[in-house]
Each structure stands twice: as structure tokens, then as C-alpha cells.
Image (cartoon, rainbow, N blue to C red):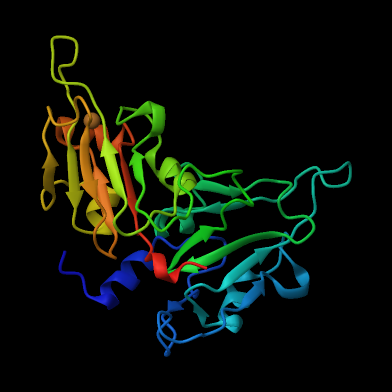
Amino acid sequence: MGLTYTQLLILLLSACASMLGGRVVTEARKEPTCTGTPTPRTITVGGSMHWNFGFNYTDWAFKENPFYVYDTLVFKYDPPSEKNIHPHSVYLFPDMWSWINCNLTQGVKIANETQGTGKGFSAYMLLGVTVASKGFNYGSPQTTYSDTPNRIIVGGSAYWSFGFNYSVWAFKNGPFYVNDTLVFKYDLPSENNTHPHNVYLLPDMRSFLTCNLSKGVKIANESQGAGEGFEFVLNKWRPYYFACGASDGYHCNVGRMKFFVLPLLRRWHY
Ligand SMILES: [Cu+2]
């Protein structure tokens, strides 16, 4: 939607998150990932200090700069024990504001208290979005890598409904790939359903964070979620910001009916 590459980086950088600090910069490598064979780095967060209380991770991130797309961050920390009654974990924040305020309510816990042991918890960087490595963390994901596009029901068995956390759903069920189809299913308007859902595509991270529908495009009306549901193909490599526009943003804000995805290119997968 008219986003330049730089804007994309800046917008997504604010979604970046992790305790790492505002100086984590994710750039494309000089050599394009699609043609060259650059070697992503595997970086242990905090170096020999690992992921520990009191260590200055902002300074550490500044010194380790720059980070690149597909670099892997490894979080190592001790499991809970008698001596470790406040074990660490790893959260991903949706935006800079949550990060600055350490507000976990909108965050996603990407690694629990026991995942930092042994080889640690791995996450890789994708355009400023930290993506937890799959399989290792969530068992078998709904979407597995294949050469053919997947058809994914948004929300799984919850469908497109008020109160379900779609950001967590998208995070746990991703990554999605270019040409995958998202299916939105929701009930027709009726006497019992006086605030029916719909689907909006929002233009940018700011509209998404504030549930501002004014620049959004309504891609499915109140009746298109019935039957087989409304199908949307992620046909470009770009971020997609979805939201329900019902009740002037109330479903989006309070009902958490929003999520964003950045589909991957299949040939980049490894
Ligand atoms: Cu809704």
C-alpha cells in the first residue's frame, strides 16, 4: 500500500520488541538474500552473561549492532529451581510504547521459563520482527512448510470472533507464505447477531495499533464470512494489517480482532 522499503523497516522496527533495546537495527544485507549465500549470525543474547537480571541489554545490543535479517538470537537462562524462584522468560512486544513501559498485556510470551536451558531459545530476525523458530517451541504448527500454498482458517476453530487474541494466533500459527490463503469465517447478521463482523485491511502499523479504520479498506462485508467464508490471498511480500471494523473499531480495540502478517517467500525458506 505505497510503503517504501525504508518506511516498512521503520514501521516494523517499532514492532520489534524483545528486551534488547531501541538500538537493535535490522537491515537487509548488502548482498541480497535471494541470490547470494550470506551467512546469518547466531548471537547469544548478553554474550557470556546470557539472559540475566541486571545486565544492560541496551548497551549490549548497541555494541553488537548491526543485526541482520535472518540472524538468530539465542536466549539462555536457568530453569526454575529452589534457588531460582523468579525464572526468566522472553516476551515479544507489539510496539515501542509497550516496550518502553514494560507493558506485557499486549505482549506475546515466546519462550517460557524452561526454554532457556541447554541450547537456549532461538529466534530469528525478519525485517525487525522477531520470529520464534518453529517446531522447537510450539510442537507441530498448523501451517507446515510446503511448496504448495496453504489455506488457513483465521482463528482456527474460534473463527473470526470477538475476544479471541488474533495476534497470538498469528504468531503461533505463522509463518505464513506468499500465496497462502487466509479464510475468515463469521456469522451472518441476524436478530441474535446485531453487531456482525467484517474484515478491513489497514494501511500501516499506526492505523493497526490505534484501530483507526479511516484509511482502511473494507475487503469483506458483514455477509461474506458465511458458508465457506471470505478468502484472502496473501499474494505479495508485504505486511498485511487485518482488523474487524464493526462498531467503529470496538471489535478491533476491545475485542482484539486484529493481527498482522508478513508472508515469507517460499524460496527464501531454509
Ligand atoms: Cu467484529
Q: How many marks?
A: 0
The quadrant where residue 118 appears: bottom right
Q: Residue furthest bottom?
A: 30
Q: Residue furthest top?
A: 191
Q: On the picture, is 40 further left or further right than 26?
A: right
Residue 127: in sight, yes or no?
Answer: no
Where is 270 relative to 105, above or below? below
The answer to which of 262 and 6 lies nearer the viewer is: 262
Residue 115 in the image: state x and y as whole percent.
Answer: 71, 50
Q: Quadrant of the N terminus?
A: bottom left
Residue 262 in the image: state x and y as whole percent.
Answer: 35, 59
The answer to which of 169 and 92 lies nearer the viewer is: 169
Residue 173 in the image: state x and y as whole percent.
Answer: 46, 45
Residue 242 in the image: state x and y as whole percent.
Answer: 25, 46
Q: Residue furthest right?
A: 82
Residue 80: in sight, yes or no?
Answer: yes
Where is 232 relative to 16, above or below? above
Where is 245 relative to 189, above or below? below
* Residue for point 66% across, 65% down: 74
* Residue for point 29% across, 44% down: 182
Where is 159 relative to 134, above or below? above
Q: On the picture, is 245 further left or further right than 205?
A: left
Q: On the picture, is 54 further left or further right than 219?
A: right
Image quadrant of ligand 1?
top left
The quadrant where residue 48 appears: bottom right
